[in-house]
Amino acid sequence: MTLRLPFRNLQPNFCSGLFDDPLLLIRQRPLGSNLLFDCGRLQHLAKRVLTAIEAVFVSHGHMDHWMGIDTLTRHVYVTPKTVELFGPVGIAAKLESKLAGYDWNLCEQNWGSYRVHEIGSETIRSHLLSGPDGFRRTELGSRPRSSRVIFENHLLRVAAEPCDHLVDSLIFRIDEQPTFIIDEAFLDRHQLLKGPWIRQLKRRFHRREDLDLPLTVLRCGVDGAEEFRIEDVRGFCREIAAEQRPASIGYISDIGWSAANREKITGLLSGVTLLLCETTFLSDAVERARSSRHLCSADVNRLLEQLRPEFFLPMHLSKSYNRCSSRLYRELQIPSGTTLLRIPDQVTPRPLLQSEFPWQEYRASGPAE
């Protein structure tokens, strides 16, 4: 399902149905690469989609959010690349244990690897699982967390917070990086003339280079166009850029309704453009939600009232409601200014029944007469 949302360089795709294992794929259009949030059932994704994955963000190690790493490995291990993987503390040992269940006696030097980053409250510890070395784990060290941001490039940044789900479960915020849009009114006020210098300035901004070097611009003079030297290019970038509010995505998957979790949610996800949030139980099953550290529809309604996203997509409804999903939409209270996005109950193919196997249609034939 492709969401038609106000993103400039990102294309979010929720690749699951309401009851399927959550799977958010974000296409970085200018780069041609993908980011994957959670990694449950994903065998319905094409190989070209999986081989284009640059980084994987796993909320927690429960099976429905994690078991697809085997399928991903099946498609990318012969690709000479390193996939970045972010998850809670302990995820590197879990990945090593999963992959140790296979024989890697045919591994080659051009195989791909995983660089795994365990996100704690105060530190990030990294490990390398090298494909050429049969995915044996090597610790790369740890670093203190100076901010919530765990991944960044010139198109986006990803921030995370660990929450409680009886185990650590990460919630994520994905923000588009501000693009460089020239403020036409600024040009007019300062009598600046358009020219090749604008392209050069944009190149410096996007590449984050040469911003400390002077820049020569064109402006109107008494006798026509004249050159003018800008010494503080960084400050000039802030002045000439038009105001904008980059689009953002919030991703909440499997957490309990506690005061500590709610504080982390509001601190990280206020003002997001698109919110994807688990709604595992309906309101009459609040005790089941509390005991299993999930959210119910009443909890989600309270979050929506606080966060006020522009778009909201509920996900990960318990399969116990598989014949009455319409009840969820009746219980959701969507605040003014928020658009509810509906998805099919299921996107992944239905499993075959025994009577549907095609080999039952075959008939043995006797000798040709």
Image (spheres, rainbow, N blue to C red):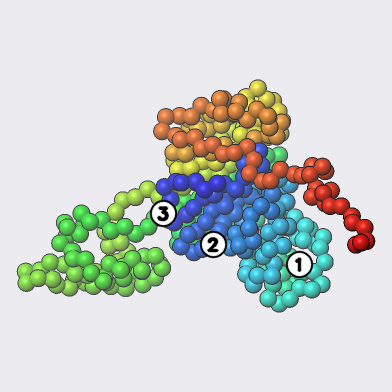
Instruction: Give the mark nearest the N terminus, 1 or 3.
Output: 3
Determine whether label 3 and label 2 are within 8 Å by CB. no
Specify the farthest residue to the top: 284
SS at circle 1: strand
Which residue is tagged 2?
33
Label 3, label 2: how far apart the Cα atoms are: 15 Å
Residues at discs 1 and 2 in contact (Cβ within 8 Å): no
Reading the chain from its start, which is encountered first: label 3 or label 2? 3
Q: Position of residue 169 (x, y in %)?
A: 65, 44
Number of marks in the rendered image: 3
Q: Quadrant of the C terminus?
A: bottom right
Left or right relative to 152: residue 181: left
Instruction: Classify 153 as above or below 343.
Output: below
Q: Residue at x 27, y 67 (%)?
A: 198
Nearest the viewer among 345 and 278 is: 345
Q: Amino acid at mark 1?
A: Arg
Residue 14 visible in image: yes
- Pick whichever, 275 or 346, lies toward us: 346
Where residue 151 sits, quadrant-wise, is bottom right
The residue under label 1 is: 136
Q: Which residue is mark 3?
A: 8
Residue type, numbered disc 3: Arg
Label 1 CA crowd tier, 10 Å (few <14, some 14–19, many 20+): some
Say which residue appears at 20% left-offset and 59% top-offset.
Answer: 187
How far apart are the alpha carbons under marks 1 and 3? 39 Å
Q: CA distance from mark 1 to mark 2?
A: 26 Å
- Would you say the residues marked 1 and 3 are in contact, meaning their CB atoms lie under 8 Å apart? no
In the image, residue 188 above or below residue 320:
below
Q: Secondary structure at mark 3?
A: loop
